Amino acid sequence: MKKERGISGFSRNKKGQVTIFIIIAILIVGIVALIYFLIPRAETTTGFDTQNPQGFIQNCMDDRIEEVVSTLSAQGGSVAPEFYFNYQGNSIEYLCYTNEFYRPCVIQQPVLQQHIIDKITGNIASDVETCFANLEANYEAEGYSVNIQSGKTVVELLPKRFIVNFTDYILTTTKADTARHDSFSVVLNNNLYELTSIANSIINWEEEYGDAETTAYMIYYKDLKVEKHLQQDGTKIYIITDRNTGDNFQFATRSGAWPPGFG
């Protein structure tokens, strides 16, 4: 009887060992699966590829540039307007103005597109420094020796897009080998160029004749919606919208205004 119990105990021990091995195997498979799925996900969220510093700068600057462009598009071409009309919570800059009645306005921004370029450049300057500093830090975290030569930021408004070029910025990285990168830019799809061209045309009509006919623009440019909202003091709010993309540009004028009760 003792011998039988010994055999039975041995059998139970053997089964217990097999069970432990199965549990260990399952744990190992689980750990490997976690490593497989989590490590690639972590690499993706960093957005950093040592072979593509240009892509890092594009991703780093995208949101900030879009934010600045959205703000100035809603406010007549300025991020912080100084001479403006408050319309539906927006401080919309006057691009043509006179405080007199009956008289046409005086253009406030003779070179509107250059004014916008200057505002974009100035408002992203600190972000450019931050993004290149972050780029350097990412390389150093990967064990690279890094040298970044700073340059200047050049904004170009072009049909259906605009480009922010970081000219003369030179990145040199050294690990096993040395690599040099000297082409950095951000390209965004936006038709600010077209919208501000129409705005310029409207402003010229306001300066010359004291008003502009919006329907003429919509007849000629089928994809545009051009609105004019007259305010009590004679101010006009123009809103130019691309029907396809939703991009818009709005600004204020006061020209050819009538005294209260005579309009």
Image: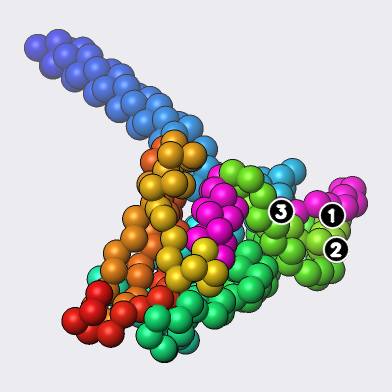
Image: 262 above or below 205: below
Percent across and percent down for residue 22 are 32, 22
Whether residue 25 appears in this view of the structure is yes
Mark pair 3, 2: CA separation:
11 Å
The mark closer to the camera, 3 or 1, is 3
Mark pair 3, 1: CA separation:
10 Å
Task: Identify the residue shown where x is 48% and y is 77%.
Answer: 104
Task: Identify the residue shown where x is 26% and y is 22%.
Answer: 19
- Amino acid type shown at disc 1: Asp
| Residue stretch in magenta | 175-204
Percent across and percent down for residue 36 are 48, 32
Residue 232's tag is none
Task: Identify the residue shown where x is 34% and y is 60%.
Answer: 228
Which badge, 1 or 2, is on the more N-terminal residue? 2
144 with respect to 121 (left or right): right
Image: 63 above or below 10: below
Q: Residues within 10 Å of mark 2 (few under 14, many from 20)?
A: some
Mark pair 1, 2: CA separation:
7 Å
Q: Nearer the viewer, residue 183 or 254?
A: 254
- Amino acid type shown at disc 2: Asp
* Residue where numbered disc 3 is placed: 185
Residue 182's tag is 1
Whether pointer 3 and pointer 2 mark residues with C-beta atoms closer than 8 Å, the reply is no
Percent across and percent down for residue 187 are 64, 48
Image: 54 above or below 139: above
Is 200 included in the stretch rendered in magenta?
yes
Per the image, label 2 sits on a secondary structure element best described as loop
* Residue where numbered disc 2 is placed: 168
Whether pointer 1 and pointer 2 mark residues with C-beta atoms closer than 8 Å, the reply is yes
- Amino acid type shown at disc 3: Ser
Percent across and percent down for residue 251 are 43, 68
